[in-house]
Amino acid sequence: MLKKGQEIAVKNFETKSAETSPPTRYNSGSIILAMENAGKLIEDEELREQIKGAGIGTSATRAEIMKKLEKINYIGINTKTQIITPTEKGELIYDVVKSSMPDMLNPKLTASWEKGLEMVAKKEIEAQEFMDKLEGYVKSKINKLVIK
């Protein structure tokens, strides 16, 4: 058994020339699964639990979300393979969001919104308080984008 710091004799080594390949593209089925399981990406245990059972969207709305993204030309879906590819417009939108409000791309944000909605349902906070916070958040993000 080797121990840390122990020296060993190397008889031979070689390097191999290779290229990495890009990750596999999502298809209409795998993207739905990724949306369902988005909570696995959240480190905060309380927020991860909040989204764990539901993921992003509901089972009824996930397919509609994909249809809408295709309809407004943010993505293209190959009719034969169902492979999803971002359009140029979609990539531009992503770049703007990533540079100006990156937290919008994090499932943790969705989880925190879900938590707020649950608090409203349990009457722990008033619906108007939640809406005011949500509106304030969205306005602050949009104000960063507006040229003054």
Image (cartoon, rainbow, N blue to C red):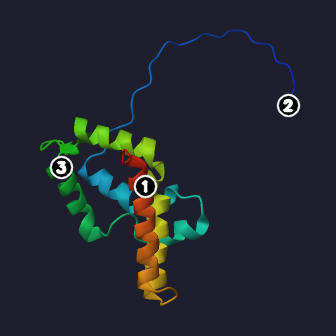
Identify the residue at image location x=44%, y=24%: 20
Residue of label 3: 70
Which one is in front, 116 or 101? 101
Please give left or right for residue 87 compared with residue 24 in the image: left
Residue type at mark 1? Answer: Lys
Label 2: how many Cα within 10 Å (few below 14, some 14–19, many 20+): few
Give coordinates of residue 61: x percent, y percent.
Answer: 25, 67
Using the rendered image of the protein, determine whether residue 51 is visible from the camera's viewpoint: no
Q: Gap between marks 1 and 3, in whole Å?
A: 25 Å
Q: Earlier in the sequence, mark 1 or mark 3?
A: 3
- Using the image, determine if residue 5 lies above or below residue 49: above
Mark 2 highlights which residue? 4
Residue sitting farthest toward the left: 79
Give the secondary structure at mark 1.
helix
Vertical position of residue 21 compared to residue 141: above or below: above
Question: Which residue does the numbered mark 1 point to in the structure image?
Answer: 141
> Residue 54: image x %, image y %?
40, 70
Numbered disc in front, either 1 or 3: 1
Amino acid type of disc 2? Lys
Which label lies toward us, 2 or 1? Answer: 1
